[in-house]
Amino acid sequence: KPTSIPSVRPTYLPSTKPSTKPSNCQTAKPTCEPTTKPSIGPTTVTPSYEPTGKPSTMPTFIPSFSPIYLPTCTPTCLPSNVPTITPTFTQTMNPTTSAPSLMPSVVPSQKPTTKPSTMPTFRPSITPSYPPTSSLPIYSPTYEPTINPTFTQTMNPTTTAPSTKPTNKPTIPPSKISSSPSRKPSSTSVTQLANPFERTPNFYVPFTFQQNLQSSILTAATASESARLNAINNVASAYYVNTTTKINKLEDLLKDAASKETKQLLMIGIYNLPNRDCSAFASAGEICCTYNPDGTCNFLGGGNCAAGIVEYQTTYIDPLYELLAQYQSLVEIVLLIEGDSLANLASNAGNPRCGSAATTAAYSAGIYYAVDRFKDLSVTMYLDAAHGAWMGWGDNLSKLTSVIVNVMKGNIVHLRGFATNVANWQPVGIMCPFQSNDGVRNLYCTNGQNRANDPCCADPCNSIPNGNVANNELNYINMLLHSISAAVPGYKPHFVVDTSRNGVPNSRSDCGNFCNVRNARIGLLPTAVTAKPDLVDAYFWMKTPGESDGCTQVLPDGTACNRFDAKCASVDSIGTRAGEPRAPQAGSWFDYQIKLLVSDPA
């Protein structure tokens, strides 16, 4: 059952073409009546992490209110070239073609039903996706109904990125490349500047994604599956520079983006801190505070990570700075800074891998240096702030705020704001009225009547009774806004939310399972049209669809995975059922997964 009422209603295409066009074809609109509410029985979920004093089995909350259901309606003026097999909804990606498009969707919550003592790290270096087809489930998008239901995919519809990387890289005349950065006035807070997603509405599609997607299109089992995969070929997503060797690939992408007729926006994931991914194993990084003989990180090696910090600065951040300085005027560059890192310092200090002096120094000094360096460029920065199902617990949110303020110091004003839900499943949801006794935690949904009747209190992981009132990302963002603004008077952050794979509510039997979730589907397309435009800059795919979250214990080639995380063997993870393939390393292309992500919900 959906967890919230959408504010953007897509245009749905029927599974079969109407026999005749409406007589008033130019202006006719569909007549839509809500269908009856399905009967959904309560279920129970067992949390994977159990705090002291909490029950071991919590029922999944089924709200008693009715969401907006898929209308049964007659579409307006279908183009004559609608294909026989058409995904059920349409996006104004390219109105001149009949390519199917994607559905706004509801986001499942990303947290165990009870408060964890140690949260797993969710990797932003991976991304799934999903465009539905003819038989849609009764799910609705997670927007408030205040937005024009037809939102435009922010790409250049007249230019199609190559399906395979060009053999000849686009050339940029030397006169177009700036040799030195243009410094932003230090007196101007970045939050006062325009929303970059509105300023540059052409979102760049990395050709690396398209190359991988083409390999899956070529092996599609049916015409319908091929059409669904083709439908996301021109949908933008972030590109993660999670190793130093990817800086060269980033240069290729920047050259390609700069060669387009219209200015492009490229989101880049900065993600290579020493001792990265301290609370999990799937996406551990390449730079270490202390190295093991095999080159992996010894998280318990002691010290203050002085050498690792220097390595991060000189081999990763500094070369990135020099590269971005060349393209800052040619490409709208948006930086996503170091996923999950400060959230791990805030909530996992008791884990020796995260709470050690070395890891703490690496994350704190590394992030400060990155922001301090990039602030001189014409780029927009969002610092990762995890998601509500993790940080929404009262003590976690206050700790996260303290860590952010202490790490960033005066440089916080150079952040446009924060990125949330990166590579996660939390619903976008509806923002509730703010009722607080401490100026931060919103108690609106703790009122039994509101919780039972207001869609903004939809709570698929039953977190509200256990003390986490950030049941969706908009409610979490509102609390984070109040917390940060109270700690830094005069600073009003803006936010961007990852909607890459939050398309189906209740996609997991346990809300702590995060790895290669079998029943997940893609969510809302990247767009600057949001339910709270004064606060939320964009919904964006900050995780590339089709890239693995982490490996199964045995890799597809039969060898052991040295970065195996137990969460990748959960009952919800691909590779744990008979007939399913093994999952590759985090960030590697996972053909089986992308084909599930674009299929109808199970």
Image (tube, helix red, strand yellow):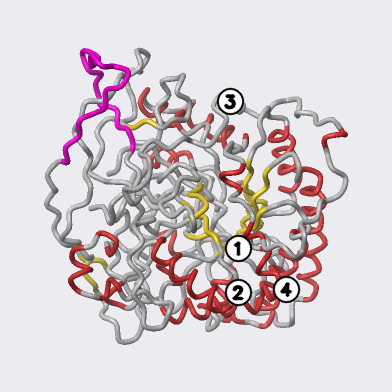
Residue shown at 45% from the left, 23% from the top:
95
| Type of amino acid under label 3 | Thr
x and y percent of residue 419 in the render? 54, 59
Return the residue at label 2. Answer: 404
Measure the alpha-carbon separation of dots 3 and 2. Answer: 40 Å
Measure the alpha-carbon separation of dots 1 and 3. Answer: 31 Å
Residue shown at 47% from the left, 55% from the top:
552
Discs 1/4, front: 1
Residue 11 lies within the magenta run: yes
Discs 4/2, front: 2
| Type of amino acid under label 2 | Ile
Mark 1 crowd level (few <14, some 14–19, many ≥20, 10 Å Cα): many
Return the residue at label 4. Answer: 365
| Type of amino acid under label 4 | Ala
> Dots 1 and 3: beta carbons under 8 Å?
no
x and y percent of residue 481 in the render? 49, 69
Q: Secondary structure at mark 4?
A: helix
Going from the N terminus, do you reach mark 4 or mark 2 first?
4
Residue 389 vs 231, above or below: the answer is below
Going from the N terminus, do you reach mark 1 or mark 3 first?
3
Return the residue at label 3. Answer: 160
> Dots 4 and 2: beta carbons under 8 Å?
no
Q: Secondary structure at mark 3?
A: loop
Return the residue at label 1. Answer: 383
> Dots 1 and 2: beta carbons under 8 Å?
yes
Q: Secondary structure at mark 2?
A: helix
Residue shown at 70% from the left, 78% from the top:
361
Measure the alpha-carbon separation of dots 4 and 2. Answer: 12 Å
Q: Specify the segment rendered in magenta.
A: 10-34
- For the stretch drawn in magenta, the main secondary structure is loop
Front-most of residues 550 and 87: 87
Going from the N terminus, do you reach mark 3 or mark 2 first?
3
